[in-house]
Amino acid sequence: MTHLRFSANPDHIQRAALFEIVRASPKLMAAFRTARTLDLPDWWIVSGAIYQQVWNHLTGRPDMHGVNDIDLFYFDPDTSYEAEDRIIQRAAPLFASTPPVEVRNQARVHLWYEQHFGTAYEPLSRSRDAIDRFACRTHCVGLRLLADDSFTLHAPFGLDDIFSFRLTPNPPRDNRKTHETKAVRQKRLWPELTVVPWPA
């Protein structure tokens, strides 16, 4: 059970472990350094590439095992498609192709979310609000690399779910289907996971 060695540890120990694990990933650190050079407003690398790399590190799996992409959020009040596309096109040649980096303006999400997912999405006021709304509390994590190479962390529900290999629902939004779909895939890739059911 060595993969659970940081479970139920104090927050400062889990934070230090998270930063050390992220720094040990060459691909993830390359993405952070490139994102920093872009200097986008209110930018964060979020969710899967972070918590999945923790699971990989603690279970001895390869760097970026199971990571489909790296999500880079930013928040620009210019919600035009053209403005976001300019950023995406500027960023594309700077990042490695594997895993791909998905750059998205969180100020625009409410404009396309309902058409894509079938439910309305209230406008956001900052990137951290988007992190807070993920279907699983375990997935609600974001990091930004600062000029001095330190990290800023946003983890509204803490880090214990990640280090406990526990997928815990985030029920304020009706995201049951997303939670359950992601749980099936992640349980297959990381059998050590415990899935907490969506509340009735």
Image (spheres, helix red, strand yellow):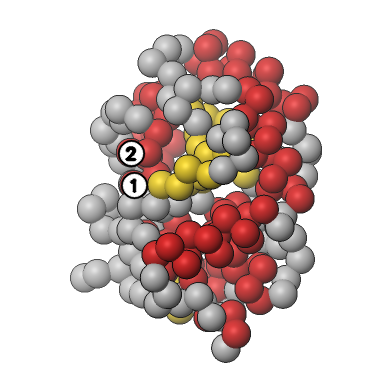
The tag on residue 129 is 2
- Give the answer, above or below, for where 149 lies relative to 84: below
Q: Residue at x 78, y 37 (%)?
A: 96
The one nearer the camera, 167 or 12, is: 12
Tell me the quarter of the image containing the N terminus. bottom right
Task: Tell whether label 2 touches label 1 (CB within 8 Å).
Answer: yes
- Give the answer, above or below, for where 150 lies relative to 21: above
SS state under label 2: helix
Q: Residue at x 33, y 58 (%)?
A: 157
- Residue at the far front: name it: 148
The one nearer the camera, 149 or 82, is: 149
Per the image, the residue denoted by label 1 is 132
Q: Residue at x 57, y 38 (%)?
A: 145
- Give the answer, above or below, for where 60 lies relative to 12: below
Q: Quadrant of residue 42?
A: top left
Give the residue type that dot 1 points to: Asp
Q: Quadrant of residue 51?
A: bottom right
The one nearer the camera, 130 or 43, is: 43
Q: Residue at x 33, y 38 (%)?
A: 129
- Mark 1 vs mark 2, CA separation in Å: 5 Å
Q: Taking the image as drawn, is residue 5 in sight?
A: yes
SS state under label 1: helix
**Left or right: where does residue 43 sit relative to residue 59?**
left
- Give the answer, above or below, for where 50 lies relative to 31: below
User: In the rendering, at what x and y percent does residue 164 appear?
Assistant: 46, 75
Q: Residues within 10 Å of mark 2 (few under 14, many from 20)?
A: some
